[in-house]
Image: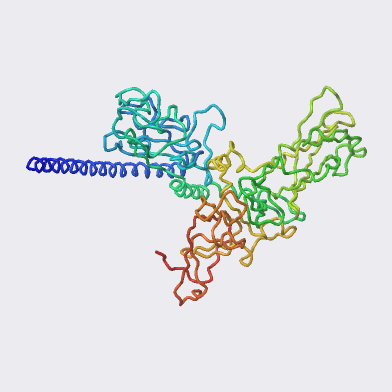
Amino acid sequence: MALLAMLAVVVMGVAYTLASRLNAASRFIAVDREYNGKVLNQAKQALIGYVAQEAAKAGENNPGRLPCPEAGAFFGDPAQEGIAAGNCTLPAVGRLPWRTLGLDKLVDANTEPLWYVVSSGWALSNSTVPPLQTLINSDSPGQIIVDGATNAAVALIIAPGPAVGAQACGGSPAWVQSRPAAGPPDLRNYVECTNATSPADATFVTSSPGNTFNDQVLRVTTDDVLPALEAAIADRARREIVPALTTAKFVLDSNSPRRWVASSTNPPIYPYAAPFADPATSQYRGQLGTYQGLLPVNQAQSFVAYQATPADAVETLGNGYIMSQTCSWDTADAYQCRGSYHEDDVDPTLPMRIQMTATFTNVAMGLRSLQTANLQVQAANDSTTDPWIDLTPSYRAEMNANGSVTIRFWATLPNIDVMGWETWADFRIRIDRAVIGDHCLLSTTTSCPGPSTTWFARNEWYRNFYYAVAQNNTANVLPAVGGCTLANCLQFVDPALTNDRNIRLLLVLMGRKLDTQTRPSSLLTNYLEYENANGNTTYEQRPMRMSKVAMSPSSVPAYTFYAPWNDRVILVDWLPAAPPSFPLAVQLP
């Protein structure tokens, strides 16, 4: 019995010692994970800040792009380690580019530098297959699979922990980790199991059975990145897209019919909106009588057309005459008349003017520009050997109430006597449908004047913008001069700032999908929030609204707050500011 009692004491002592050590080890592990969590989160916040800072820069044509991992050649080089590679094969796995992110060198509790995974579609690819650059907007998914969930992250940050002696995660042969001091690092020496697939794929895990996995993984999701990115895009839209969009207006004079001219004091005419539909499948074609919807960013080449075959050329000054001409389609888009003209029989010195007229449909249904290089007039001596002389045509572009444009263009033909020709000569006059061209905002390669705008079309950010124009600032008002007034302009309400009823044109950045929304969808409520989605002409900037009982100067404003909310209203064009109908000097918290 004494021996049994002694044995019991020994067993209890060993159990106590073992439990104490296990508790201590547990506390140590908890401390390690807590430390790693802080370091991982620091790296995550720096990554989000990097995205926002780069996206806000003028000239950045890939706003939203993540950096590639550290270039493999910089491993072990104190002067260059932590610098991101210029491009990478996606998805990419490598060490965190801490220097590119503006960080000190971050290490985990085992003093190992952090590792980093970047999703396909979110960094500059080194692929030779187009598209070579990223295409990022509010609806771009993260393409990393985490613990079986698809589109779970745009990036991962990993604390690799100590080297594992043998990986028993189904790999064959088993990989024994080592941590060499030089040479490009092999990911299998730092991360384990599914995370260690080489070459890298898009599938990762945060845990794995057994004792051969010690990666601590932090996700960076679209919900993490997009709020900061959208704030930067809204700012760039104000600085770069708004000035460009104001040049998409049709400036018309006061004549009848009204002419599309370079400048005028008359109110501008803006294109009709495209009816709202699923942005992923819409053709973005403006529609007569539609004033709110998607941006009309359709290509003129596939939408603008001849209303009818152009009429034959005519002489418009009453001097001389066209002897003969043959008119036909030179190409599917170009119409040409070719013939001979005769000098005036009474006074050969009098000038002759030749003119052609064509009407094009659907001009006011998109963002357009006049490409007058596609108007051509030529003349030549009645000889097969003399060269054609290029003449500089004049033109008028007259806008019609149905959104079509009639183009008349002409040129004064060379005086036959002055040229030393006989009594008649040849002419050619030609018009190409491309005279109605695309506005520069539609180009992925050629920027509008001023800061670069190619990022807007190339990354298809137009899919995330709602477009609203005052009815009286569209072709609907023609032939009147038109222009909205305080009674029928769009209204912009921001209770903390102003209440303007004088907006001609505005955009709304339809932010990322909220938890209450479903996309893709043709319902506006799945893209805009609350009053911005009701089809009225009043738009709100903040998720709040002043109560109607608080409209008198003596009353205390009352607000109703709406959430969730991520709309960003961007004003494009407005009348001279009018005083608000009630005081709005209340400073909101």
Q: Quadrant of residue 37?
A: top left
Image point 83% across, 42% down: which residue? 310
* Along the viewing direction, whichever of 53 and 42 lies nearer the viewer: 42
Asked whether, in this view, residue 500 is left or right of residue 160, the answer is right
| Quadrant of the frame with the N terminus | top left
Image point 49% across, 31% down: which residue? 125
- Residue 112 position (above or below residue 31): above
- Residue 476 position (above or below residue 193): below
* Along the viewing direction, whichever of 468 and 516 lies nearer the viewer: 516
Give the percent coordinates (x, y) of residue 184. Answer: 36, 24
Specify the farthest residue to the left: 2
- Taking the image as drawn, is residue 367 in sight? no
Q: How is the image coloured?
A: rainbow
Specify the farthest residue to the bottom: 554
Asked whether, in this view, residue 374 is left or right of residue 386, the answer is left
* Along the viewing direction, whichever of 336 and 555 lies nearer the viewer: 555
| Quadrant of the frame with the C terminus | bottom left
Give the percent coordinates (x, y) of residue 441. Answer: 60, 43
- Residue 162 position (above or below residue 16): above
Q: Quadrant of residue 438?
A: top right
Asked whether, in this view, residue 43 is left or right of residue 472, the answer is left
Give the percent coordinates (x, y) of residue 146. Answer: 44, 40
- Taking the image as drawn, is residue 584 in sight? yes
Give the percent coordinates (x, y) of residue 334. Answer: 78, 36
